[in-house]
Amino acid sequence: MYPILISSQVTHWTLSQQRRRTELTVEAAYNSDRERVIKLLVEVASSRPEALRDLKPTTVFLGFGNNALNFELRCPNSGCMSR
């Protein structure tokens, strides 16, 4: 893979906007109920004070990892969420 060279100005939009999206990779044991994992992740993310009320978090099942089920939590928020 070749590095990308930028020859013009780059704007970092998250500095000027309050809305961001945090993406967090989560692993669960193979015997876990996928629907329950998804429901719990969305509930926990929604309960955070940084979570936006008009945009709900989502969880995506990514697939089977070497040792666990892999999920990604995508949470729109009003600032940097602590992990």
Image (spheres, rainbow, N blue to C red):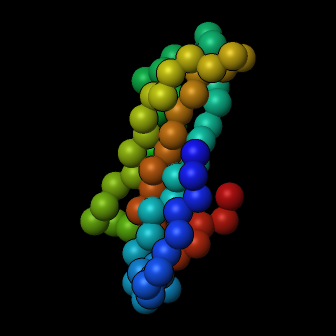
Placement of 66 over or under 75, stated as above or below:
above
Q: Nearer the viewer, residue 74 or 6?
A: 6
Check the image and report above or below for 37 versus 18. Answer: above
Image location (x, y in percent) of residue 72: 51, 40
Marks counted in the figure total 0
**Rendered residue at 71%/17% (across/down):** 67
Quadrant that contains the N terminus? top right
Q: Residue furthest top?
A: 31
Residue at horizontal 43 percent and vertical 39 percent from the top: 59
The residue at the point 51 percent across, 17 percent down is: 33
Q: Is residue 63 left or right of residue 76?
A: right
Res 77 seen here: yes
Q: Quadrant of the C terminus?
A: bottom right
Q: Quadrant of residue 25?
A: top right
Instruction: Judge whether 59 appears above or below 51 on screen.
Output: above
The spot of residue 79 in percent (x, y) is: 52, 76
The picture places residue 30, in percent across and down from the top left corner, at 63, 13
Instruction: Name which residue lies at 44% across and 87% down.
Output: 9
- Given residues 70 and 7, the one toward you in this image is 7
Q: Is residue 63 above or below residue 75?
A: above
Residue 17, position as x, y percentages in the image? 40, 84
Q: Is residue 36 visible?
A: no
